[in-house]
Image (spheres, rainbow, N blue to C red):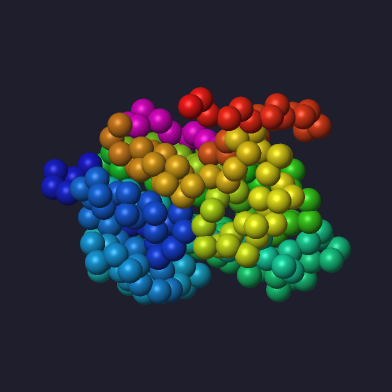
Amino acid sequence: MSAAKPVAVITGGAQGIGATTARTLSERGWTVHSLDRKPNPDAAIVSHICDVTSEAELMACAAAIGALDALIPCAGVNLRPDDSRAEQLTLDAWNRTLAVNLTGVMLTVRAFRPLMNNDGAIVLLSSVAALRAMPLADAYTASKGAIVALTRSWSVDYGRFGIRVNCVCPGPTATEMMSGVIDAFASNQQLQLPQQRMARPEEVASLIAFLASPESSYVSGAIIPVDGGAVAHSAGMPFPKRKASAA
């Protein structure tokens, strides 16, 4: 960790979980660089316009930023309307999803890992879709499952450099990416979550911030769901009704 203010680089840092994580770290004293196709609206965040599918743009950002303590690739595409099962999924839809969710992560790590300080941290963002079945979303689940596998591989490989690598797997989270499906989810799917609500971006960001910090100095290779207990739930078992809060 840097002796001065620690430095974090976050891709997808202009919206959703990435933006919330950027704000959380900034409020905790970090210098935060957001890489996104649009600027982060927070003046405290250093914005870089960057497409994570472009290795040249990532390398240019890395050269401009220099040394860092935490790398947090959050850029990603959500479930797409054209995602489906293998025999119905177009190759173009498959390639578009993996280009951002998987190849973009690899290119980000390739650009920035050599610049990381000793005792640094890489925090990857996967999904509960990598931990439990999600039918009719082959491209999305493949991309997120690969991130889990890379977490384990990189945690072993980069350990020799003092770099920790961990993975956060959010469940449904109330972000801009989910804005078009939140109402439908709330009415049709809510009872499938033990907490009977979506996650708040702040709940995911707080775990990412912990894993990026020295407080988690001996945590590496961990795959951690933030899903209100959804992965732990046995399919088919009914949930008890939520109790009202005590007055």
Q: Is residue 102 above or below residue 193?
A: below
In the rendered image, residue 9 lying in the magenta stretch gets the answer no
User: Which residue lies at the image location 24% right of the left edge and 45% below the top edge?
Assistant: 28
User: Which residue lies at the image location 79% right of the left edge and 56% below the top edge?
Assistant: 136
Q: Which secondary structure type mostly characterizes the magenta part of the structure?
A: loop
Pick the front one: 105 or 239: 239
Position of 104 with respect to 111 (left or right) is: right
Coordinates of residue 141 in the picture (x, y in percent): 68, 52
User: Which residue lies at the image location 40% right of the left edge and 74% below the top edge?
Assistant: 38
Which quarter of the picture shows residue 31?
bottom left
Question: Is residue 151 something that shows in the picture?
Answer: no
Q: Residue furthest right?
A: 87
Coordinates of residue 26 in the picture (x, y in percent): 26, 52
Position of 88 with respect to 155 (left or right) is: right
The N terminus lies in quadrant: top left
Pick the front one: 247 or 123: 247
User: Which residue lies at the image location 71% right of the left edge and 39% below the top edge?
Assistant: 192
Q: Residue furthest left?
A: 4
Question: Is residue 96 something that shows in the picture?
Answer: yes
Residue range highlighted in magenta: 216-225
Coordinates of residue 22 in the picture (x, y in percent): 34, 55
Q: How many tags in the picture?
A: 0
Q: Is residue 50 above or below residue 161?
A: below
